[in-house]
Every structure is written in C-alpha cells, then in structure tokens.
Image: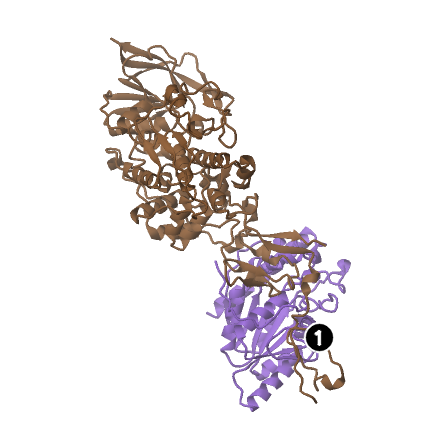
Amino acid sequence: MKKRKYPKDEIITFKSANEMPPLAVSLGSMRWNKTGSWRYIRPIYENKTPPCDEACPAGEDVEGVQYLCEQGKFEDAWKLILEEHPFPGVQGRVCYHPCEEACNRGHYDEAISIHAVERFVGDYGLNHGLIPPRLSQERGHKKSEKIAIIGAGPAGLVCAYHLARMGYTPLVLEAHPVPGGILRVGIPSYRLPKDILEAEIEHIIKMGVDIQTDSRVDRDLLLKDLKDFNAIYVATGAHESRNLNVPGEDASGVMSGLQFLIDLNLGKKIAIGKKVAVIGGGNTAMDTARSVLRLGSEVVVVYRRSRAEMPAIPAEVEEAEHEGIPIHFLATPIRVITDQERVVQMECVKMELGEPDESGRRRPVPVEGSNFIMDVETVFTAIGESPQLSFLTEDIQTEWGSIVVSDHGETSKKGIFAGGDAVDQPRTVAHAIGSGKVAAIAIDTFLRGKDTAKIAASVQIGQKGSVSMERYLRGEIRYNASKVVRFEDINLAYFEHKDRVDLPRADIEKAKQSFVEVNSGLPESAVTTESGRCFNCGVCNMCENCWVFCPDISISRKTDAFGYDIDYDHCKGCGICVEECPREAMSLEEEQK
Amino acid sequence: MRFQIPEHELMGPGHVACPGCGAAQAMRYVLKALGEKTIVVLPACCWSIIAGPFPYSSLQVPLYHTAFETAGAAASGIKAGLEIQGDTDTTVLAWAGDGGTFDIGIQALSGAAERNDDILYVCYDNEAYMNTGIQRSSATPWGAWTTTTPVRHFKNRPKKDIMMVMAAHKIPYAATATVAFPDDLVAKVQKAKTIHGTRFLHILSPCPPGWKIPSEIAIRLARLAIETKIFPLYEIENGEKYTITRQPDGVPVIEYLKFQGRFKHLTKSQMDDIQDMVEKEWENLLSKTERSH
C-alpha cells in the first residue's frame, strides 16, 4: 500500500482502493462537517442593562462597580464611577439608593448593599489619592467656548466636571461663600462630613473649573456680565422655604428649617429654644430635627400624613426615630400662639387620610374638634422648598415655580440650559447629578453643532432617563440593548443564598451628641463578599457556563479580549448556552435565510 | 459559582449528535477527565453515529466500534491486550447506551464485572433506543411514551435499577452522574480512574427528540431530574458503601415531567404515583446510605 497523507480536518476522497487503509480506520476529524447549517436560531453575546443601572438617576455603572469590587479592583471601580460623576464618597453617604430597590437579588434573598459598597469605593479613592480618569487628547482637547454655570451644587458641579473633561473651562458662580450647594449648606455633617465633600470638589477644581463663591447672580449680571457666554447652565437649586400659611407664623421663633441648616453649616450662631417643633416629613425636616437634637434641645416632628407618605429617605426617618425623635403623624399646625411676639405654643389639628391627590398620595383632611396645643419655643418649617427664579429673564419659561426644560435640559431660550432642583424633577442628589450630566452632553452637542436629541437617545441606559457619560465620551457601548434584565431572566441554579452585609449600626447615644458622622463604612473584606453576591444581571463576567455546556465544542474564549467566540460553522443552535447563561448576557436571534 | 472542568478538549466539533444532545456533553466531560491515554469501546448506540462515518472520527483518542451486545467483553479483551503489551496506564472506556447496557449488553457487562476486569464502563442513559427511533428499553421510566409504548399503552414497568445490579457484582466503584453537574461528573470519573477493577458510571443524558423537549432546556431537565430525586447522584463502593454526592432540593416531580412530551399524557394521579415511587426509592437509598456509614 502506498503511504499517503490525508487532510486532517477536510473531506477525504479515495481515488482508488489503493489509497484506502487496510482496515476501516479513521483518518481525519469531523471538522469538515459544517453542522452550523442545521441551525435556524443563533446564539449571540448581547449584554443588557441591569435594573440597578437603569434605576440610578446618576447613571452609574452599578453592576460594573460590583464586578470590579468582587475582584478587589477598587481603583478601577472608583474610576468607573468617576466616568459618570465625581461624587462617590458623597453619594455613598447621602444617596437614597433606588438601585437597591431595583436589584434583582432582592427577589431572591436580599438586594446587594450597593450604597455601602459605593461609600467604600469613594473613600478608597480619597484615601489613596486617586485622580479622575482623563480622556484622550482628541476627545478632551482644549475648547474656547465660554460656559457659565450658575450654582455650585451637585448639578452645576457635575456639569462643570464633565465639561472640563471635554476641554472646556467653565466658570461656576456660587452665591454662598463655599461651593457644594445643598451638599455643603443643607446636609448636616453627621450625614456627610465636610472633608469628604471638599476633597471631591477639589478634584473638580483641579480639572480647571473656576468656582467663584459669594457671587449671587441677579438679572443685571445675567444680562450684562454673562451676555457673551456661549452657553449658560442654571442650577440654582430650591432654597425658598414654603410658608405654613397659618396665623402667627411671622412671630419670632418661627423659622425656615433649611435656613437653619444653612446657618448651621456655615458656622453661624443660631439661638433656638429648649422645646422645638419641626413641621414636615421630608429630608429637610429630618435633618433639621436631628440637628436640633444635637444642639441639645427637645424636638418633635409634626407631619400631616402617615409614615407611608413621608418623602424623606426611609433610612433617615428610621435613624431619626432611632435617636429618639418622636414623629407626630397625621397632625398639622393651624395657629402659632405668641406671647409678646414670641412663640409659646402651637395649636394643631389631627388629620385623617382621604382620597389620593395629584401626587398620588392620600390627601390629609382635618378631623373636626381634634385640636390640641403643644408647648414650643421654636418652630421650624420644612414643608418643601421652591426655586428662587426672579433673576431669570422673561424669555426663559417657568411653570409652577420651576424652569421648564426639555429632556436634554434645554430651556426655552437657546443656549441656556437648566437642571437640578430648579427644574421640575425629584429633589434628590442623584437626580441633580443626572441632570448635570444630561446638560453637559446637551451643551457640548449644542456648541459642536450636533444633533442633541439623537445623541442623547444613543446614550440612554434602560428606559428611565439615565444616561451613560462613559458611552458619550468614550464611545464604548456598555449595553448594546435597551433591554433591562428582570428577575425571571436570571438562572437561579447558579446562585446560592447568602446573607446581605449591612452597614454596622452606630452607637446612638454617642452619635446624637455630636455632628460627627453617624455611620461607619464597611471593611474591605465585607465589600468583596458583598459585591460577590451580585447577579451581574445582563453583563458577561466570563463565568464559563456557555463554554462548559456547549455540546458542540463551538464556544471558545477570546485570546486577545474579554469574552467568547462562537464557531458558527459548527454551532447547531441548540440554545443551551443562552438558557444556562446565569445572567441573560446572551440572546437567540432568528437565523437569516 | 464556577465550574472547574479540565481545559483540554479530546472531542471536536462537526460530530452528528442532535442539537442539545446530552450524550455528546457526557463524552466531552468524560474524555476531559480521563485524558489522552484512553481507548473508547463503542457498541451500537447513538454514539456509533455521533462519532462520524468512516474515515472520520470526532474523537482524538482511539475508538473501537463493536457489536451491540459486546461492550463489556470487547473492553475486557482490549484491556488484556494492552496488559500483555505492558501498557498498564491506558484506560479502557466502554461507552454504551442504556439499550446496550440494561438490555442487550448486560451479559457481557455482568461477565466483565464478575471477573472484575480493569475497565471503566459508562452507560449514557437517554432512557430508550433513541438512535433507532425511540423504542422502549428497560431503562425507560414508568409512564413514558415511546414508539413501542404508545400513549394508550405507555410503559407500566419501573426503570430497571442498574445500580443495584452492578452493586450486586461487588465491583469497587459504581456511581451516577449527569451532564447538568459537570463538576460532580468529572470528579467521579477522576476518582474511577484511580481505582483498578470494574468501574461503572451511570450518566443520565437528556435526549431532546426522544424526550420531546426543546433542545435548550436539556440541561435544565437533567438538573431537575436530580433536584426532584428522580435520578439521585450517589456512589457505591465495593457494592456496599453508599454515598449521596448531592442533596436534592426536593422539587416535586411534576416540575420535571411537565416539560417533556413523553409524559404529556399522564394524569395528575399518575404523576402522584410517580412521586410516591420516587419517594420510596429515595427512602431506600437513604437507608442504604445510613446503613453503610
């Protein structure tokens, strides 16, 4: 017999019996057999939006942060947050963390402690002196347009941060003697220590943002000094306390809760009585009450609805109660009783909940004859704040006391943008940060003459209006689908039940005597454990299930990048990889004929 | 949770198993665990076809096709041949389906096991003669439809307890496994590899056409077979020492049955009967486990 070489992976043809082996023995592999032609559906790798990312008004890559933290890559995690905003240390303390509400793991056992992880990452960045990630020379080259930002609160500073990254040199005008807005003058230091905030603002200043404090903008200044600016961003917040509209309200001893917090945070001396009532159920009310407690007075909160309707972050309410602050639900003041123009008592009436009002919450209705009298020396009002907009020119449209803006933060006047608490959106730091990002994108596209709406749509995360700055600036597509992963999409066979790690509880007796931060953070080991609980919904983390379960040996790891390749020559389209993917990072597509 | 199965592939693509075939996955894992020094002995079964026609093979180890009833005998002979040549470290792997194990090949298997010949016998069990068109075997479970047990005369005898049969031979190692738990499967093969004598591995292998299931849920069903206790994962050492290797979640059997066309005709009370049978078998297994420890 003639010795003959046979092709290893191709079809073997015998031209004569001489070429055949003496026994029926295999001479090559089956690789020539392109079983891919059997397929009518094809598996693809398609990352999707995790529900936490969609729920984050600040547009953080929450899942990405968990993924990095699990591996102990805290520096990378910090930089990933900094792609979206410069405030992880702040947000890890004050955010109302809707991400945890949305977390799919919450349907399985308990949501990931995303808030506590963010705080750790924020502190890690500050403790290690990390610097914000830079953009490429091309993307971040110096630009000459002049941009003014009115208000150095979270919205204004985030907008300035991103514009500075893009190469602009924005000028930020701040009315108060210190930057930070409500973060600096509204939130007490036991919730947000000043040094954390200052350090994070320092990052923004170092990027070339010029913040001019003690510069309140009035109409004159707006019309004259800011006339030749190419774009203006109005982020002046909401600092006007609403009135109680009850007799005696003008008496000495009735004050705005927010003004009290501002004075306190700016180090002014404030005289308050021994018995204090705080009216309202929002965060300002909680902050005011807890601050009063720390000044050594007796304090009670009076709120006209029930606990379920309170707009404050539930954790804040819980902590206030934990510190022993009584909350008088379903009651409202109807008269302030004075003696020589000083508050001595307050007459209240009990309320009951009626039909839902326009906010969807049940409307409180007074119960006739239920009046009662409280002895008080100081009354703080904290029933809501509205923006102070008298400096705006008439061509900037307002409605119900807020500036009217498009989905991209554009006002009715070309070149003027607005965001944060000055526009009609939920009054949270996270929303302010989100609107600062949206405005930065809108200002950049406006100044570069690009189609804002089209670009804004391409950087959406899920369906709730959050945007990815990373995608805008780096063109990296974090999620190539608007699809959001639901709990039903998770393959639970690959996850074991594990308890959530929570922030350690503070010593209340000690905490309520000072303005030192109440909660301590998580230790590093707890952070890696906790982020290891993350389902990583919709995002491939190379768990290998697709590779392990492929019956057709058609999946291989990429040699030069993250992820896998599918050998479509041989994949039969059984769909097992998609089904066994624990996190819905794969999809099936109909095969094109 | 991440699987830790060996990297090296000894099986290639292009094989002709149906989409979602559990037998293809089983072969891939077993070869990964055994490594290159392996000879596969293959009686008539799905795998006679899957491997590919002459002059091809989708395996990168020698593969010997043999007659339906001869897996045990052929493997014994090949092992004897290797030993005469002084090769003691090549594993001879008899790889047969449930037909070639439970029915047609049981005499050769029993002979090899009784002699305690040094072979690893794997039965990949898809619970019927799938290759020839889904005829009943003695591994077909109670209540299942096959082409020879049509719906009106569905199989009304329980699945043969092949593990008990093998335990009765007092062979050093017998174990069950399935493709949904590759770590468990690989660990058992690796353990078997270190033992001399007849080793028997019973691998439940979902068959999408034969079980009448969509291919993508094949792994899910293999997992449910374990979690419902229909197919517990355990080992028997020396015919006596029973060890359960995975505690089932105890999912009701209906969760396993309802996805499969071959059980579609069953009434609620018939499914309850299956649940009772499963509980009884599980109790049996538990008491054997307790007695042997």
Identify residue for label 1. B53
Q: Secondary structure at mark 1?
A: loop
Give the residue at the far top of this rendering: A340
Q: Which chain is brown?
A: A
Amino acid type, residue under disc 1 in the picture: Pro
The front one of B284 and A61 is A61
Colour assigned to chain B in the rendering is purple
Q: Residue A426, percent across and down? A: 45, 30
Query: Which of the two residues, B174 or A18, is positioned nearer the viewer here?
Result: A18
- The residue marked by circle 1 belongs to what chain? B
Which of the 4 image quadrants contains residue A326? top left
Residue A146 visible to an observer of this rendering: yes
B130 vs A140, left or right, is right
- Where is residue A327 shown, x and y percent of the image? 35, 26
Question: Is A236 rendered above or below residue A476?
Answer: above
Query: Where does residue A545 sit, x and y in percent of width and height?
Result: 54, 59
Q: Is residue B271 left or right of residue A99?
A: right
Q: Is residue A498 visible?
A: no
